[in-house]
Amino acid sequence: MSVAYIGRLAPSPTGLLHLGHAATFWTAYERSQARGGVLRLRNEDLDPHRSRAEFVAAMLEDLQWLGIEWSRAVVTQSERLPEYQKALDRLLEEGWVYPCRCSRRDLAQMTQAPHENHDEEPVYPGICRPAQERLGGAFEPGTNYRFRVPEGAAIEFEDGNLGPQRFTAGRDFGDFLVWRKDGVPSYQLACVVDDAAMAITEVVRGRDLLQSTARQLLLQRALGLPAPAYFHTSLLVDANGVRLAKRHDALALRTLRERGCSPEEVRAMFSANRTGVIAQA
């Protein structure tokens, strides 16, 4: 029997889950339950320097403790490198990506300032961008690759929470990395490949990833993959107005559990403050 709604949880095992994660994941769980659907869990462990096995175990335990259920086995990205390579090869064959040999110094000297979202790349100035519209070529190991965005193209989508969204390629974001020279795909490429492989119908994540959605829509079109629906949640912030991150150890689910908080109490904390401030404990 097919399932009409398939959502996903996609934590990274680079630290302990905190209230901000919990709020987003609980929203995903509520939306799947309301639609009679299921959630699948993806372990986004592609950061070789920060991903740790103990954080994988902790996130699974914390999600279960919070009351979130998912179906099937956990999908682990580090086990799927051949699938990402296939996607990169197709992008290369069809001329969507090009090798980038910019050094860190080159990139540091870009004139554009980074976007306010912590995960956004500065707009790439096109140092390595080839003159040809579609270049093609064979894969070169040990090379960074960038996706060539269609300059001036409008990328539009309807967000399930925030309404109509519109970004302009080349202005709001530039040519973005899809492959790193250490042999690891970017978040953008891995996410697109996995969402399609997992048959995800809706992606629920934080609003700081809105521009990532625009990038991923371009990759989906280039690879001929279906686009899921998107629902970007408001972000929880601390008393200083800074969005919650893994540095907020006092607000980690593990810490709150150790202090005697129940799952119901934790859910009440972020449910009452979805657009407000979570005080540092």
Image (cartoon, rainbow, N blue to C red):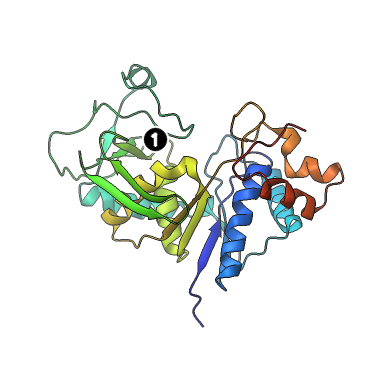
Work out whether residue 203 or residue 53 is closer to the camera in this orientation and state it: 203
How far from the left and from the top, in percent, is residue 155? Answer: 28, 48
In the image: residue 190, left or right of residue 74: left
In the rendered image, residue 212, in percent from the top left (x then y), is placed at 40, 44
Vertical order, 80 against 181 (above or below): below
Q: Residue farthest to the bottom?
A: 1
Helix, strand or loop for disc 1: loop
Residue 176 is situated, as x and y percent measured from the top left of the image, at 33, 37
- 35, 213: nearer the viewer: 35
Horizontally, residue 65 falls left or right of residue 104, namely right
Q: Residue 195 location, x and y as percent?
A: 45, 59
- The answer to which image quadrant residue 180 occupies is top left
Tell me the residue at 32%/20% (across/down). Answer: 110
Q: Quadrant of residue 245?
A: top right
Residue found at x 48% / y 40%: 208
Res 37 quadrant in image: bottom right
- Which residue lies at the image location 63% right of the left edge and 26% below the top edge? 240
In the picture of the structure, the residue carrying the numbered disc 1 is 181
Vertical relation: 51 (above or below) 221: above
Three-letter amino acid code at the position of disc 1: Lys
Q: Residues within 10 Å of mark 1 (few under 14, many from 20)?
A: some
The answer to whether one can see residue 17 in this image is no
Horizontal side of residue 32 vs 214, given as left or right = right
Q: Residue furthest right?
A: 260
Q: Residue at x 71, y 50 (%)?
A: 57
